[in-house]
Image (cartoon, rainbow, N blue to C red):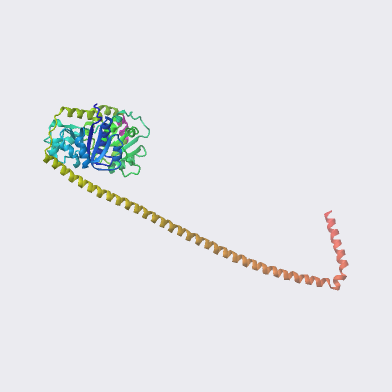
């Protein structure tokens, strides 16, 4: 493998912001060429997070605006190994230099960005045009836009994987399988199916998905190694197959379900997109996920062995470099062709950046609106909480007032009882006083004094009688 120290590799990319298909291809190519010693320049119309930081974290990789005059001046004299172009984003200096081999890459059979911006320029300037699948190559040929490109300058670049994915050990059987769902556009039927199998399988979600557990992060060998199986389409399929993980290929285009030796080639011809197969119901997907998992797990090592060198990034890049070395150099573009492509690119770049600014403004307004809604909801909750607290306080006050009324009634009843008892006691005191006066008067009479000895004798007699009865 050629040491590229002191050489430059240029990669053109329409947008470098989100973790998505072509952006990941750019990042993996930058890592590959950087590891070989090259300085890598990613020329783009727009860039943002997280991709800009991820790309510039790679040694000797920089991200530049495609229309930066300083970049244009640097590229006119740089020792350039090759240029790899997505979406026809080509720095002007590369249009004017005939000594730089340019590879135009097309990563989709349906997305408008993946078709030539100015087909005559690609026909005349491409050292190679590469296509992600046979379907993509066929669709581009059917447009008639690459008829001027010799067949020997057309090749496949089938989303090959970095070596790290090839070193993953096969997944052992597990009582509760772990399904890794990688998608930015999970269809409703798949979302419902994942809910149906959630009790039997652990579901890990990667990508821009509405589910709260979903994470936006790069798919790495370590992430694939954690999975029992992978539910995905497109580029992640190759990651999983290289890591001996069974793949359930299904997304918004539909899909074949579990990949097997019988459907692998047919699915690969369409870049594992799921196109060309039927769409299923949620119940059908759920049954298929559970019932077919063990068989798919046993077949996974066989599918890994079926992947040829075209699915390994190092081998695929070396193969293309070998093709470049054997093909004659393309003649330089005339000034009219350079101007035509550059003007078309400037128009598109201006429109894209304007649209990006509008989208970013809309996003900011949506964020503000969401923040305002959250603040309003919090205010409503606070008001409702205060209202509930006030109602509870009113209930508490009413309960206390009722208790006070009961206590007042009890106090009044107690006071009335006390008043009656006081009156009764006064009556008893008056009666006792009258009896005492009557007794005093009786004791003062002559008869009381005369009968005193008899009362004494009577008292003694009574006591002696009581004493005899006790004996």
Would residue 259 appear left or right of 434 to someone viewing this image? left
Viewer-side residue, 462 vs 139: 139
Residue 234 is at least partly visible in this image: no
Viewer-side residue, 138 vs 408: 138
> Is residue 296 a member of the stretch shown in magenta?
yes
Q: Is residue 322 above or below residue 428?
A: above
Viewer-side residue, 86 vs 6: 6
Would residue 308 appear left or right of 215 to someone viewing this image? left
Would residue 376 appear left or right of 405 to someone viewing this image? left
> Is residue 463 a member of the stretch shown in magenta?
no
Would residue 55 appear left or right of 454 to someone viewing this image? left
Q: Is residue 165 above or below residue 424?
A: above
Q: Which residues are magenta?
A: 290-297
Q: Position of residue 233 (x, y in %)?
A: 26, 37
Q: Position of residue 2 (x, y in %)?
A: 23, 27
Residue 432 occupies which quadrant of the picture? Answer: bottom right
Residue 89 occupies which quadrant of the picture? Answer: top left
Q: Is residue 66 above or below residue 413?
A: above
Q: Position of residue 312 (x, y in %)?
A: 25, 29
């Amino acid at each position: 493998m050629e040491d590229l120290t002191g050489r430059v590799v240029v990669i053109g990319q329409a947008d470098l912001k989100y973790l998505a298909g072509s952006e990941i291809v750019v990042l993996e190519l930058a890592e590959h060429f950087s590891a070989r010693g090259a300085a890598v320049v990613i020329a783009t119309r727009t860039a943002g997070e997280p991709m800009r930081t991820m790309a510039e974290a790679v040694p000797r990789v920089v991200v530049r605006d495609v229309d930066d005059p300083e970049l244009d001046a640097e590229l006119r004299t740089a020792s350039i190994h090759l240029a790899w172009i997505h979406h026809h984003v080509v720095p002007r200096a590369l249009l004017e230099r005939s000594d730089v081999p340019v590879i135009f890459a097309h990563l989709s059979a349906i997305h408008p960005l993946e078709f030539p911006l100015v087909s005559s320029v690609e026909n005349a300037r491409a050292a190679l045009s590469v296509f992600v699948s046979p379907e993509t190559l066929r669709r581009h040929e059917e447009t008639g836009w690459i008829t001027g490109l010799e067949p020997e300058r057309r090749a496949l670049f089938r989303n090959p994987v970095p070596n790290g994915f090839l070193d993953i050990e096969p997944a052992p059987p597990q009582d509760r399988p772990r399904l890794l769902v990688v998608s930015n556009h999970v269809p409703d039927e798949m979302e419902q199916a994942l809910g149906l199998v959630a009790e039997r399988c652990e579901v890990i979600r990667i990508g821009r998905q509405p589910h709260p557990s979903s994470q936006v992060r790069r798919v790495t060998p370590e992430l694939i190694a954690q999975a029992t199986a992978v539910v995905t389409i497109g580029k992640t399929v190759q990651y999983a197959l290289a890591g001996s993980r069974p793949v359930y290929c299904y997304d918004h285009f539909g899909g074949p379900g579990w990949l097997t030796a019988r459907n692998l080639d047919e699915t690969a011809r369409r870049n594992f997109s799921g196109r060309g197969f039927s769409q299923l119901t949620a119940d059908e997907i759920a049954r298929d996920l559970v019932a077919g998992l063990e068989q798919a797990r046993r077949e996974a090592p066989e599918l890994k062995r079926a992947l040829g060198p075209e699915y390994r990034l190092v081998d695929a890049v070396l193969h293309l470099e070998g093709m470049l070395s054997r093909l004659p150099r393309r003649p330089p573009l005339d000034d009219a062709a350079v101007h035509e492509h550059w003007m078309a690119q400037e128009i598109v770049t201006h429109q894209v950046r304007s649209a990006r600014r509008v989208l970013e403004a809309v996003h900011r307004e949506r964020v503000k609106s969401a923040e305002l809604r959250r603040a309003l909801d919090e205010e409503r909750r606070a008001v409702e909480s205060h209202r509930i607290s006030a109602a509870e306080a009113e209930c508490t006050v009413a309960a206390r007032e009722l208790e006070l009324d009961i206590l007042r009634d009890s106090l009044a009843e107690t006071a009335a009882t006390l008043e009656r008892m006081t009156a009764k006691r006064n009556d008893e005191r008056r009666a006792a006083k009258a009896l005492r006066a009557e007794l005093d008067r009786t004791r003062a009479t002559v008869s009381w004094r005369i009968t005193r000895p008899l009362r004494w004798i009577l008292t003694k007699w009574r006591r002696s009688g009581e004493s005899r009865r006790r004996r």
